[in-house]
Image (spheres, rainbow, N blue to C red):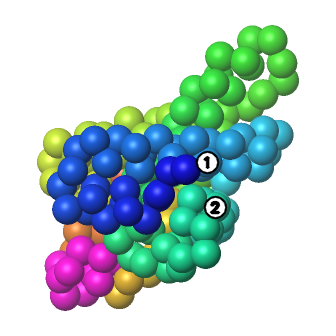
């Protein structure tokens, strides 16, 4: 039987093989839950993503309270972003045969109409990675783990002000790229 907690600890210590095993477990469970949840819906929210992360944490860790650790939530937010992007891509491919719309992320954090297409947002977040990897992490934690700025600062092991600055800069770039009127 696979010991997720032991693999998680090895992955956190830098074991690449354990990291791949952990990713496989988290991705598989997150994808299964997300597919069941968003097979019909056209919009998702940060709150829904966080609820799935918590459920994944419960399922992969068994009786341990892994879903409550910021390290796991931060890791799972990145995985959840990939799961959501993969689901959006699958929906786009199936759209030709069925009546599917784009999968959109509806959140007041990015006030644009219509809500941002998940695939477009994923591409923009990838571009943030090139500018500042921590900015990408902050965006993932806000949009895919529904963390507030104090929780993000804790996850990044820094004071809230630098995390807030990263969020503000990244949010402005995202809003500008999405064509929002109030990007400033």
Question: Which of these two is toward me, 169 or 150?
Answer: 150
For this orientation, the residue located farthest to the top is 97
Residue 149, given in percent of the width and then of the height, sits at 36, 81
Q: Is residue 130 left or right of residue 171?
A: left
Total numbered circles:
2
User: Quadrant of the image for the C terminus?
Assistant: bottom left
Mark 2 secondary-structure assignment: helix
Q: Position of residue 30 (x, y in %)?
A: 60, 49
Regarding residue 107, the answer to whether it shows in the image is no
Question: Are dots 2 and 1 in contact, CB under 8 Å?
Answer: yes
Q: Is residue 156 a member of the stretch shown in magenta? A: yes
SS class, disc 1: helix
Q: Residue 59 location, x and y as percent?
A: 63, 61
Q: Residues within 10 Å of mark 2 (few under 14, many from 20)?
A: some
Is residue 160 left or right of 152 when viewed as pictured?
left
Q: Is residue 162 above or below residue 80?
A: below
Sequence-first tag of 2 and 1: 1
> Which corner quadrant of the image does residue 104 belong to?
top right
Chief SS of the magenta region: helix
Task: Relative to 9, say whether 173 is above or below.
Answer: above
Whether the magenta-drawn stretch holds residue 5 is answered as: no
Please report the residue visible at 61 percent of the width from the left and 48 percent of the height from the top: 29
Look at mark 1 in the image and give the residue it sits on.
Answer: 29
Image coordinates for residue 113, horizontal then vertical, percent: 61, 51
What segment is highlighted magenta in the picture?
152-163
Q: Nearer the viewer, residue 140 or 105?
A: 140
Task: Name the residue at 62% across, 34% down.
Answer: 87
Tell me the residue that label 2 is attached to. Answer: 59
Q: Is residue 109 above or below residue 100?
A: below
Viewer-closest of 149 and 8:
8
Horizontal side of 94 relative to 28 (left or right) equals right
Q: Identify the residue shown where x is 61% and y is 68%.
A: 62
């Amino acid at each position: 039987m696979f010991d997720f907690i032991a693999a998680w600890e090895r992955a956190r210590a830098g074991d690449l093989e354990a990291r791949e095993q952990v990713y496989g477990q988290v991705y598989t469970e997150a994808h299964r839950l997300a597919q069941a949840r968003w097979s019909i819906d056209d919009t998702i929210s940060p709150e829904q993503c966080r609820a799935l992360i918590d459920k994944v944490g419960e399922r992969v860790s068994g009786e341990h309270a892994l879903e409550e650790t910021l390290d796991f939530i931060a890791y799972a937010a990145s995985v959840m972003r990939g799961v959501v992007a993969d689901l959006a891509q699958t929906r786009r491919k199936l759209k030709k045969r069925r009546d599917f719309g784009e999968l959109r992320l509806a959140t007041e954090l990015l006030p644009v109409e219509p809500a941002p297409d998940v695939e477009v947002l994923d591409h923009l977040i990838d571009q943030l990675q090139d500018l500042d990897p921590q900015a990408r992490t902050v965006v993932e934690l806000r949009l895919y783990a529904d963390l507030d700025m104090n929780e993000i600062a804790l996850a990044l092991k820094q004071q809230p002000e630098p995390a807030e600055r990263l969020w503000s800069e990244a949010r402005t770039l995202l809003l500008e790229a999405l064509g929002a009127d109030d990007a400033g």
